[in-house]
């Protein structure tokens, strides 16, 4: 079985960890490829920082800080303290010393002329991840947020302002000229199952789908496309995706996000959406009939990924829905 996952950061990373655990136990011959959002990436103090790629890598490697939800475990921040003393960088965006080692390595490869996808393959080879990570694009496509106080990088809006400034729109700079990274379209086309992780629908999954060619590939794949809701009982699981959904006029509900992605067929006829099926939490079970009316197979299961065991069970439920 070939499984391809569209993933953002923390939520996607935990889902991938559970998926790997389940697959290794029940389908040891299966392969997992994760297509990871790069819209959060940026150049900072001369380093190319890729938050989602690193969150996924550290989580799968067992190196992530579970308490903070990001960065390396046992991290120190002496270099960031020195940078603040020199007055450079973003004082509200702290990079750990071990994390800086990753960014230095990535920046070294990129400055030598290597594309991000090749650099990612070399960096991730350090650990036996059990998942192949591919950035959505080798091109620099950075998400910026338009607010009444001006346009800023997504990380400034998200980390510094905690999404407290109302977002008027999101702009993926450079997206129109971007191309999918090598292997992305093939991973979607050749998959048996495509999973859309419970990641931010706007700035994570939305950015991936915004790369020319990727949305069309998902819509055209012969694989079953299963989405996992990032919304439970009308609230975001993690982060501030509700502020992102409001900016594009989508209600913060499992049903509304499913409508946003859309169904690939309705009443047996082709449609313009992306999904064949949608998983919601048990608390949203009442939405299942409405989801099925949209043309989606739907199931209500526990979505909270509280630990590796519950994450693995969620992955099992997603693959079971694909088989159904």
Image: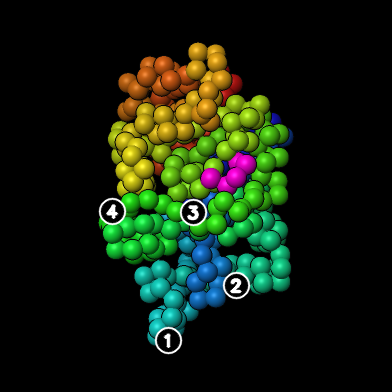
Badge 3 element: strand
> Label 1, on which residue?
86
Alpha-carbon span between mark 1 and mark 2: 19 Å
Question: Which corner quadrant of the image does residue 84 belong to?
Answer: bottom left
Task: Kindly state the secondary structure of the residue where label 1 is placed.
Answer: helix
Circle 2 sits in a helix, a strand or a loop, which is it?
Answer: helix
Residue 238 drawn at (x, y percent): 37, 47
- The segment highlighted magenta reads 210-214
Question: Which label's residue is closer to the chain start, 1 or 4?
Answer: 1
For disc 2, the marked residue is 104
Q: Nearer the viewer, mark 3 or mark 2?
A: 3
Of the residues tagged 1 and 4, which is closer to the observer? 4
Q: Is residue 211 magenta?
A: yes
* Residue designated by label 4: 166
Mark 1 vs mark 2: which is more N-terminal?
Answer: 1
Q: Earlier in the sequence, mark 3 or mark 2?
A: 2
Q: CA distance from mark 4 to mark 3?
A: 17 Å
Which quadrant would residue 164 be assigned to in this image? bottom left
Question: What is the spatial separation of the Cα atoms under label 3 and label 2, in whole angstroms?
Answer: 25 Å
Q: Are marks 2 and 4 in contact (CB under 8 Å)?
A: no
Majority secondary structure in the magenta region? loop
**Numbered circle sitting on residue 172:** 3
Does residue 150 show up? yes
Alpha carbon separation for disc pair 1 and 4: 32 Å
- Disc nearer the start of the sequence (1/3): 1
**Among numbered discs 4 and 3, the one appearing first in the sequence:** 4
């Amino acid at each position: 079985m070939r499984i391809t996952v569209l993933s953002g950061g923390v939520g996607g990373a935990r889902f991938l960890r559970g998926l790997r655990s389940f697959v290794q136990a029940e389908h040891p011959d299966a392969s997992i490829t994760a297509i990871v959002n790069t819209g959060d990436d940026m150049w900072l103090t001369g380093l190319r920082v890729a938050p989602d790629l690193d969150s996924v890598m550290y989580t799968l490697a067992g190196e992530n800080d579970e308490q903070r939800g990001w960065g390396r475990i046992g991290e120190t921040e002496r270099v960031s303290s020195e940078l603040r003393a020199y007055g450079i960088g973003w004082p509200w965006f702290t990079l750990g010393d071990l994390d800086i080692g990753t960014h230095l390595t990535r920046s070294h490869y990129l400055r030598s002329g290597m594309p991000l996808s090749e650099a990612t393959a070399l960096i991730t080879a350090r650990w036996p991840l059990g998942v192949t990570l591919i950035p959505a694009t080798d091109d620099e496509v950075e998400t910026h947020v338009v607010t009444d106080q001006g346009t800023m990088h997504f990380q400034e809006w998200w980390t510094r302002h905690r999404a407290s400034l109302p977002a008027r729109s999101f702009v993926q700079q450079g997206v129109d000229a971007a191309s999918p990274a090598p292997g992305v379209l093939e991973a979607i086309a050749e998959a048996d199952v495509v999973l859309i992780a419970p990641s931010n629908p706007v700035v994570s999954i939305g950015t991936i789908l915004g790369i020319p060619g990727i949305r069309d590939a998902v819509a055209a794949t012969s694989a079953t496309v299963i989405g996992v809701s990032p919304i439970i009982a009308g609230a975001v699981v993690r982060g501030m995706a509700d502020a992102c959904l409001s900016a594009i006029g989508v209600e913060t509900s499992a049903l509304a996000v499913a409508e946003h992605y859309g169904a690939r067929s309705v009443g047996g006829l082709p449609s313009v959406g992306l999904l064949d099926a949608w998983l919601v939490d048990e608390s949203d079970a009442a939405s299942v009939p409405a989801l099925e009316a949209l043309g989606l197979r739907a199931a209500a299961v526990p979505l909270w990924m509280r630990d590796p065991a519950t994450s693995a069970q969620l992955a099992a439920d997603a693959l079971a829905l694909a088989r159904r």
